[in-house]
């Protein structure tokens, strides 16, 4: 309950033993030791009965014309047993008290600074930052150093091929001098040097072998394009809402205005629909030309190309609203069946539908059309640094365990989850345990750390897969980031069992329904960031390789 946007909490009733016997036998009429009576009765194995408070007192403190503080207390002596056919008379006393407290500080009593600004919270941010530094160092040490050796091996291989074709041979002494860097250190080990000095060129191995397939269109291209478009919409939405909350001192703290965060989410979601359309449209255009239909039509043309465009646009428009609508409709149905107040009224749902159909859908379609007609590849005529072969290359089956995507993806998600799980605890506590989250600066920092961790881990996963000559990296990169959602949902189960006292179908359904939406949204967001990092990494390494 809210009074002048101030939250008011109070128990409806209690589950107690026989109250009359407890008052007469143990404690008299003041019920000052009610909890002890309940504990003793449960230890004796007695059954508990439902009781409801029938008398309450609402204490309102005011300063001039402003309400400063609202407290609700329940009279234990008014507890009455709930029985079939029982009639209750409820009383509410309102007491007005004058106070000297200022209006601007009235919400401070609801902000648990000792909880949210505890040293553990600061240490978690520091540990996550150290994890980012570790992963960045790992990428620099392993990938860049390994790629440098790969480039050197490929360059020497192609250089000797050109020399052998021109002169029929090469001088070993000159080759030995070319195989060192500016510091005199060898670029290749002895085995690779001996192989590269052979009379015939060295066959490419590792990730360069798939240069003709690495930019091939992924499976289910329209679906992946729509998911990535939705992911970029969520990235924009989350960043916009967090920055809006961080700027609270400029326009008013968001936790002080009831529903302000929800309004911000609706506004940013509607306006960011153009981002979803552009991202999905441009991604589909980028890869559609590499499909058989794209080659036959010379790009996105008529026939199957038009139908694929329409499918991509439709999926981008309805994908996220459909998931939200199904889950929220199910929760709404349960709330109506049980007669609770936690349901969305029909008029509110109608307004949301009009907002989606008249604002979000047109912007999404406009963004898709812009993305479809955007020139890709910059000044180059080809959007990719390597041409795509007409016939797909077979993927080797005998590869080490660290080259199998299914073995790498769970580790990537675990690292990403490890960077946010402390902050996740504070967020879940504010959602389900009557706490007001107000440390949005922490949230912004954790969001930035999550972006970096997802990008770093995905790059590592994509490199190991490409090095195993597996060119199907697009879905692998997405799953690498999206796997974070699995750990978030598993943690929500742990939180439900050990950190809450929820029970019953209504509470359980609402908890897991909303946690499912949060997990799916976070997974889509992280998967999109992982795909973006993997895409830039793949483009970068193949731009610097000489391909026959």
Image: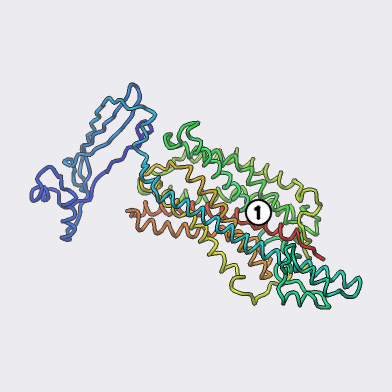
The residue lying furthest to the front in this view is 184
| Pick the front one: 370 or 318 | 370
Element at badge 1? Answer: helix
The residue indicated by pointer 1 is: 225
Q: Is residue 190 above or below residue 521?
A: below
Dot 1: within a 10 Å radius of its alpha carbon, few (fewer than 14), some, or many (20 or more) residues? many
Position of the N terminus, as image quadrant, is top left
Query: Residue 61: percent from the left, percent from the top?
Result: 29, 28
Where's residue 305, x and y in %?
Answer: 74, 54
Q: Residue at x 91, y 70 (%)?
A: 166
Which residue lies most toward the right here?
A: 167
Q: Is residue 121 visible?
A: yes
Instruction: Give the image location of residue 443, x and y in percent.
Output: 48, 46
Question: Which residue is painted at 69% across and 72% down in the image?
Answer: 395
Query: Which picture quadrant has residue 361?
Result: top right
- Give the percent coordinates (x, y) of residue 369: 71, 44
* Residue at the extreme top: 64
Q: Give the mark count.
A: 1
In this picture, residue 134 sits left or right of residue 201:
left
Residue 510 visible to an observer of this rendering: no
Left/right placement of residue 292 relative to residue 481 reads right
Which residue is at the front of the view, 146 or 413?
146
Residue at the (64%, 54%) spot, across then down: 532
Give the quadrant of the C terminus: bottom right
Residue 339 drawn above or below residue 89: below
């Amino acid at each position: 309950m809210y009074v002048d946007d101030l939250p008011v909490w109070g128990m409806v009733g209690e589950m107690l033993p026989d109250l009359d016997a407890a008052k007469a036998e143990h404690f008299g009429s003041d019920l000052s030791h009610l909890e002890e009576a309940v504990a003793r009765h449960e230890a004796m194995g007695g059954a508990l009965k439902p009781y409801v408070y029938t008398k309450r007192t609402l204490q309102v403190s005011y300063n001039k014309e402003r309400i400063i503080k609202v407290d609700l207390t329940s009279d234990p002596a008014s507890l009455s047993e709930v029985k079939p056919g029982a009639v209750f008379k409820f009383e509410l006393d309102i007491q007005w008290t004058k106070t000297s407290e200022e209006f601007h500080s009235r919400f401070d009593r609801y902000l648990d600074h000792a909880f949210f600004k505890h040293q553990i919270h600061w240490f978690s941010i520091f540990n996550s930052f150290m994890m980012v530094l570790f992963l960045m160092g790992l990428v620099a040490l392993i990938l860049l150093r390994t790629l440098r050796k790969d480039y050197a091996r490929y360059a020497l291989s192609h250089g000797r091929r050109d020399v052998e074709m021109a002169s029929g041979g090469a001088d070993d002494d000159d080759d030995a001098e070319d195989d060192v860097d500016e510091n005199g250190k060898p670029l290749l080990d002895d085995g690779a040097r001996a192989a590269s000095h052979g009379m015939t060129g060295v066959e490419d191995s590792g990730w360069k072998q798939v240069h003709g397939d690495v930019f091939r269109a992924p499976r289910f291209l329209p679906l992946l394009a729509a998911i990535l478009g939705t992911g970029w919409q969520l990235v924009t939405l989350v960043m916009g809402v967090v920055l809006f909350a961080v700027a609270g001192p400029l326009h008013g703290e968001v936790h002080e205005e009831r529903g302000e965060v929800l309004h911000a989410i609706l506004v940013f979601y509607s306006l960011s629909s153009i981002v979803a359309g552009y991202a999905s449209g441009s991604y589909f255009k980028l890869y559609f030309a590499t499909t058989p239909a794209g080659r036959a039509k010379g790009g996105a043309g008529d026939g199957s190309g038009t139908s694929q465009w329409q499918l991509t646009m439709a999926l981008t428009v309805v994908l996220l609203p459909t998931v939200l609508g199904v889950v929220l409709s199910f929760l709404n149905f349960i709330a109506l069946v049980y007669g609770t107040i936690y349901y969305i009224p029909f008029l509110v749902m109608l307004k949301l539908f009009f907002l989606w159909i008249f604002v979000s859908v047109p912007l999404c379609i406009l963004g898709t059309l812009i993305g479809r007609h955007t020139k890709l590849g910059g000044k180059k005529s080809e959007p990719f640094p390597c041409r795509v072969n007409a016939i797909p290359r077979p993927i080797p089956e005998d590869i080490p365990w660290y080259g199998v995507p299914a073995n790498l993806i769970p580790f990537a998600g675990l690292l990403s989850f490890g960077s946010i799980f402390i902050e996740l605890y504070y967020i879940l506590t504010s959602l389900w345990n009557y706490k007001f989250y107000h440390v949005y600066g922490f949230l912004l920092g954790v969001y930035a750390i999550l972006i970096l961790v997802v990008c770093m881990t995905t790059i590592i996963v994509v490199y190991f897969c490409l090095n195993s000559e597996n060119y199907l990296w697009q879905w692998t990169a997405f799953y690498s980031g999206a796997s974070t959602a699995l750990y978030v949902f598993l943690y929500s189960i742990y939180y439900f069992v050990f950190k809450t006292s929820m029970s019953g179908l209504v509470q359980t359904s609402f908890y897991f329904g909303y946690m499912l939406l949060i997990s799916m949204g976070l997974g889509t967001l992280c998967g999109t960031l992982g795909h973006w990092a993997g895409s830039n990494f793949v483009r970068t390494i193949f731009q610097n390789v000489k391909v026959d």
